[in-house]
Image (cartoon, helix red, strand yellow):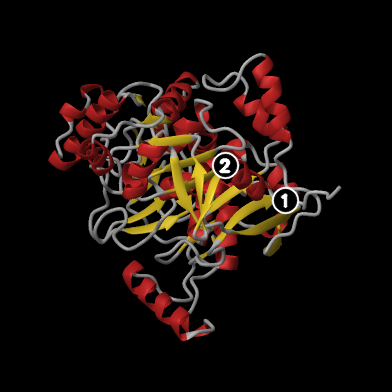
Amino acid sequence: MNQPSPRTLYDKIWDAHAVVEDDGETILYVDLHLLHEVTSPQAFAGLAAAGRRVRRPERGLALFDHNVPTEGQASGPAGVIDIAARRQLEALETNAAHFGVEQFAMGDPRGGIVHVVGPEQGRSQPGMTIVCGDSHTSTHGAFGALAFGIGTSEVEHVLATQTIRQRRARNMRIWIDGRLPDGVHAKDLALHLLRQIGVDGANGHVVEYAGPAVAALSMEARMTLCNLSIEMGARAGLVAPDERCFAYLADRPAAPHGAAWDDAMQRWAALASDADAQFDQEVRIDARDVAPMVSWGTNPSQVVAVNEPIPDPAALATADARHAAERALEYMALRPGAPIAGTPIDRVFIGSCTNSRIEDLRVVADIVRGRQVPATVRAMVVPGSGLVKRQAEAEGIDTLLRAAGFDWREPGCSMCVGMNADRLLPGERCAATSNRNFENRQGRGGRTHLMSPALAAASAIAGRIASPDMLD
């Protein structure tokens, strides 16, 4: 009897969801479809025009996150000043109700950013296929789910058929030895990896993160790591489900219960990559080499340790790299060879689907306790969901942050995407916990430095880029 070939975690999920092969592509069944207001209106309009219904409405969840203001959400979409944003929010509200898709309204404490709400509701589970019209859907891979972003036409296809056409990716494993040093966080690890392999280092692959350092990460930290997989060019990021994963999901509203929970854990435990599974590409690093990181340029791989100088483009290996660095430094108004630490900032944004969970906010609170944001800096904290906000307020974090001079906001994507009222002004420099630092990303002419919540909190207090150990 032939033994089955060893398979990776990605292979196992793919094989379990393959419906049919067709001309080099596979039609995959989709377990969970997350929807938001920006990439869904045309998809729903296409369904309506064709007289189709949503194939499996119970497999969807609609949330308001990109365009929502981070103040005054109790007024609902009608209270949104921006006309285009209001129309998109109202369209999602109408479409979800018409097609029978569950939605959490603006102001509902269960609502917030799709990539925060899905996990905390227990909708994101090991072995699932999860899609959303948002590139950072890779976040849900922290649970051992194959999760990836899709375009608007694909959103319509999933709504109509509960399937999606995909070409199989290659397998990549990033093995991380050791353990992160004290004061170094998952965001630092992700930025370190981006520095190592670049924004195209994982092109055409699904990345599995493994090794002792990954096993030691909390689920919230694993979500941060998987969130930034897309910045490496990966189709998705994965972490094999384990006891930490099971403990996080236990008793979540949508998680299995009773005997179904026991059955689920048995299935989930079998998802781990087989010992002899082959990967098309492997990268190995030591977590002990990771330092607190900050971006200096206009893509997430243009980063240095906070105690390092800004690179000199002339020292880079290729003409393309030198040109990209020169353009980035011009846009960012930075000088090669100058220390990145001490660079004055105007704004601080702590939030986004990368770093807006309760663990992130606790880190911030510990650093700013008893300190004050200078009058020259406007700092804001935007929880990732209403439940995160409620938990932070129960712990007194909001009171502490307000006393330190931070704005305490309502949940949403906020300044990360700049599609709402939270934007940088031209020339403003921002310490941000979000995932992208592209030109004009957080506001036309705005300059974004990516970093962890710890560095963002310390920078807010210092009024310049700093780490906690640089504070007085």
Q: Is residue 255 left or right of residue 78?
A: right
User: Residue at point 77% right, 53% down?
Assistant: 5
Q: Earlier in the sequence, mark 2 or mark 1?
A: 1
Q: Residue furthest right?
A: 1
User: Taking 390 as reference, is 375 above or below it?
Assistant: below
Question: Toward which corner of the image does residue 46 lie, by quadrant?
Answer: top left
Q: How many marks can you see?
A: 2
Residue type pointed to by label 1: Arg
Real-space Cα separation, disc 2 to disc 1, in angstroms: 15 Å
Q: Nearer the viewer, residue 285 or 33?
A: 33
Residue 159 placement (x, y as % from top left): 36, 37
Q: Nearer the viewer, residue 4 or 108?
A: 4
Residue 461 placement (x, y as % from top left): 43, 45
Residue type pointed to by label 2: His
* Mark number displayed over residue 71: none
Q: Nearer the viewer, residue 75 or 457?
A: 75
User: Taking 276 as reference, is 461 above or below it?
Assistant: above
Secondary structure found at label 1: loop
Secondary structure found at label 2: helix
Q: Is residue 103 left or right of residue 192?
A: left
Residue that carries the numbered disc 1 in the rendered image: 7
User: Taking 299 as reference, is 346 above or below it?
Assistant: above
Q: Residues within 10 Å of mark 1 (few under 14, many from 20)?
A: some
- Regarding residue 52, the answer to whether it shows in the image is yes
* Mark number displayed over residue 17: 2
